Image (cartoon, helix red, strand yellow):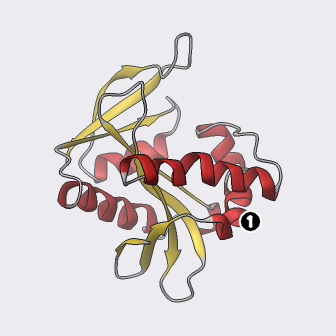
Amino acid sequence: MEVANTERLLLRWFDAGDSAFILELVNEPSWIRYIGDKGVKTIQDAQRYIENGPVEMYQRLGFGRYAVELKENRAPIGICGLIKREALVDVDLGFAFLPRFWGNGYAFESASAVMSYGRRALGLSRIVAILSQDNHRSAKLLEKLGFRFDSMVSLQPGGDELKLYAAAA
């Protein structure tokens, strides 16, 4: 299901056909460094990741992480969407792109569309984002989107301290 489109991008729900893309994305060194190793090592692992992550959240909440594709050729380039984590009161904006697509404004373009969707379709008044403390590139993007540093949080007892940014949706 298509969620949003911009001048250059389509954002849609993930499905099992995205397994090869997910396998590539979640094994990128930047994903592992800033998001973590999700243990996705095979196409079957990627299918389970899609089913137990984005698809489960679509079914439960009506939103989740979305595939970001180039309009011109429908090539998947990244992931951007909204996540409801048990450890956070507010809905969380998340994004990640294959490094070969960095520096083209796709993260800003897709995140802007997701935030607009969150306001318009979901009625969100506040959206947060969490970052590892050394993820300066994403921090700059969040500030450009209107987020401001709010506090330090941990998603689990004894877990890493993460920066929590917040924006009025």
Q: What element carries label 1?
A: helix
- Residue lying at the far top in this picture: please name it: 158
As shown in the figure, which amino acid type bears the numbered disc 1? Ala
Compared to 138, does 70 lie above or below? Answer: below
| Closer-to-camera residue (129/45) | 45
Taking 106 as reference, is 36 left or right? right
Q: Which residue is drawn at 61% across and 52% down?
A: 51
| Closer-to-camera residue (124/106) | 124
Where is residue 38? Give x, y as percent: 69, 40
Residue 165, by quadrant, is top left
Taking 106 as reference, is 118 left or right? left
Where is residue 121? Give x, y as percent: 22, 60
- Residue lying at the far front in this picture: please name it: 59
* Crowding at mark 1 (Cα within 10 Å: few <14, some 14-19, many 20+): some
Compared to 162, does 74 lie above or below? Answer: below
Residue linked to disc 1: 20
Q: In which quarter of the image is the N terminus?
A: bottom left
Compared to 114, does 30 lie above or below? Answer: above
